[in-house]
Amino acid sequence: MKLTNDTLSAYWMPFTANREFKANPRMFVSADGLYYRTTDGREVFDGSSGLWCCALGHNHPKVVKAIREQAGKLDYASPFQFGHPAAFELANILADDMPDDLNHIFFTNSGSESVDTALKIATAYHFLRGEGTRTRMIGRVNGYHGVGFGGISVGGMVNNRKFFGTLLTGVDHLPFPYDPETMAFSRGEPEPCDAYADELENIIALHDSSTIAAVIVEPVFGSAGVYVPPKGYLKRLREITEKHGILLIFDEVITAFGRLGYATAAERFGVTPDIITIAKAISNGSVPMGAVAVRKGIYDTFLDETKSGIELFHGYTYSAHPLAVAAAIAVQKIYKNEGVYENVRKLEGYFEDMAHALGDEDVITDVRNIGLMCGLTVAQKDGVPMSRSGAIFQRAFENGLKIRITGDQVAIAPPLIVTKNDIDKIAELMRQTIKDVG
Ligand SMILES: Cc1ncc(COP(=O)(O)O)c(C=O)c1O
């Protein structure tokens, strides 16, 4: 099909300025390793791992083989009342990777579904324990938890909420734990600032703990532009939630599977939540998949309290889809057998130096980093939001680098298999792009 103004209009693209895109489309036709290839035959370095998901880069031969073989063997199996062995194998692999006793895995198809599943599990858990008044959820200003009604309710990015009505009732938000005065240009975790986590005590005092089911946070803000928690922040949230019988949910849709050099951010920060939501790198983005890991005590409560019959009235037609499971098993084996997380730990310092060196540019007003992810704040032109970051995004693409922007924040998160040379390449393309845009 020839792509013209007419044929481009049928596809209503998500989170995209459709008018601008269709006037000047950015199209990929293939990918291999760290590079995409565009319709006009150019190579573009994938500086954002697709959408934070392609940790191994693209078209890894072992993943391609696993998907191909599975497609010819078992294309689909109902996950309600039936199973297929590989789903149980994958659940065990993932359970082994989760911290402590988060060893029960519920499969979904995306991060948004994982979040809504986690919120439902948290509410039903309290209901089954005879604390049905605990329905309130606490999210955070600037948090991103996908696009379901649950996710946007606990999320804190205004554009994702304001068009969609009253959302879930009974939700409150912790403040954004970031102060440019004291935290700009921090390397890794900013210095401690207990006030942000302690605000949870005020929220609990306002609503009473008997009404609160769970607190949900991204261990590192991803979509808002890579904001790393101050030292001790997550630990303090854990202490407070535990004290008040509130579940703590880590939304690790971006951070799980190596982005911070460990299977989970929970492991990296040494803080164990009650529920972890995962997606994206679970299957390297090759076939859609998500999952929710819950502590043994939560799973046991469902089984003990319901006695017989269905314990959780929830699930998706495509939960544990055979193609996604096959892809995820192949991906998880590569993470373990090919030293992928170790590579992140080895290169984190080099990547950090690269990111902070870009901070020398006048138009970069903040740099944040952890693992293989960094966020750069870009100064606006004439006070117009996204004026310079949008130009940098477009110019980077033309120069051969795919990055991600949210508002005035640029995020760079390359595949976890990069080398020092690849990081140098990112730096070179970013410098050139910043110079071109001015
Ligand atoms: C922390 C977090 N939660 C949830 C989601 C939603 O995932 P999906 O787009 O797969 O629904 C995202 C997506 O970026 C995310 O970063």
Image: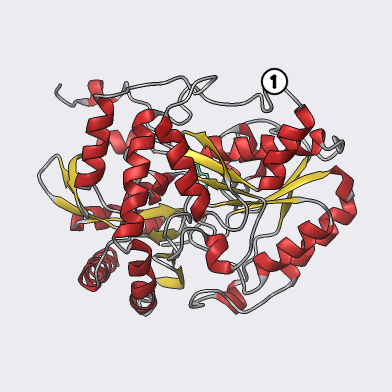
Relative to 375, does residue 330 appear above or below in the rendering?
A: above
Q: Which residue is mark 1?
A: 309
Residue drawn 23% across the image and 45% down it: 62
Horizontally, residue 39 falls left or right of residue 53, namely left
Residue drawn 63% across the image and 53% down it: 101
Label tally: 1
Horizontally, residue 115 falls left or right of residue 92, namely right
Q: Position of residue 7 (x, y in %)?
A: 23, 21
Rendered image quadrant of residue 204: bottom right
Residue drawn 81% across the image and 45% down it: 212
Horizontally, residue 63 falls left or right of residue 110, namely left
Residue drawn 49% across the image and 61% down it: 226
Q: Position of residue 189 (x, y in %)?
A: 55, 74
Horizontally, residue 21 falls left or right of residue 177, namely left
> Which quadrant, please, contains the N terminus?
top left
Element marked by disc 1: loop
Q: Which color mode does the image show?
A: secondary structure
